[in-house]
Amino acid sequence: MTVSMGNQKGLTLLEVLVALSILALIMMGLMFVVGSSSKAITMSKDRDRATTLASTFLELLGTTAYDDLVEFNNVITSDPVGTFPTNPQFFDICERWRNEIETILSQDAFGTVLVETNTPVSGRTRVTVFVFWERGGIQHSANLVEVR
């Protein structure tokens, strides 16, 4: 007795295995794309937060007299004792900024300020605010520059 395969309907085991293998490859590719997208979204959120923190500090400096801006030169929020201004009002501005950075980004995040007088032209002051943070073992930074 011979059985003819031509009249059989349905899938063979081999066809099912090939289809499942192709489906598994497609799913792995999609998982990679989702993982990469998630990482990019996290990085974008961190950069947005850091830029907002830098902008916040520049706004806090907006109430500071032009001649007092140099008090904030070389402020490093990770070293308040050695770099914060001695004036209590200015110290409080820096302390508030330090707390915001550590709360919003991470305990290891910090900010720095560079104040350059007579730059870019005489009679002007350039204030550059940097925010640094670490994510996944990689150091990241964002900065904003304002000229007064």
Image (cartoon, rainbow, N blue to C red):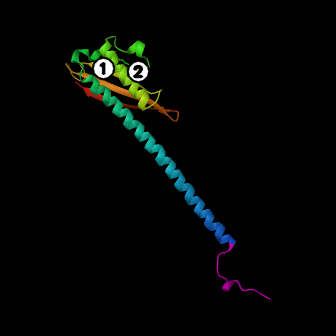
Judge whether 38 appears above or below 123 on screen: below
**Residue 84, how many percent across, how many down?**
37, 15
Where are the magenta residues, as a range? 1-12
Q: How far apart are marks 1 and 2 (CA)?
A: 15 Å
Which of the 4 image quadrants contains residue 7? bottom right
Which residue is painted at 38% across and 35% down in the image? 49
- The x and y percentages for residue 124 are 21, 21
In the picture of the structure, the residue carrying the numbered disc 2 is: 77
Q: Give the crowd class for mark 1: few <14, some 14-19, many >=20 residues within 10 Å.
A: many
Residue furthest to the top: 86
Is the residue marked by circle 2 packed among few (<14), some (14-19), or many (20+) residues within 10 Å? many
Residue 111 showing in the rendered view: no
Question: Which of the 4 image quarters holds residue 100?
Answer: top left
Amino acid type at mark 2: Thr
Magenta segment, principal secondary structure? loop
Residue 38 - label? none
Task: Specify the label residue 115 is tagged with.
Answer: 1
Name the secondary structure under disc 1. strand
Residue 135 lies, in percent from the top left, at 49, 34
**Residue type at tag 1:** Val
Please, is residue 134 above or below residue 10 in the view? above
Asked whether residue 54 is in view, the answer is yes
Task: Reply above or below: 62 against 84.
Answer: below
Which of the two marks, 1 or 2, is nearer to us in this view?
2
Mark sitting earlier along the chain (1/2): 2
Circle 2 SS class: loop
The percent coordinates of residue 68 (x first, y second) are 25, 15
Q: Does the magenta stretch include residue 9?
A: yes
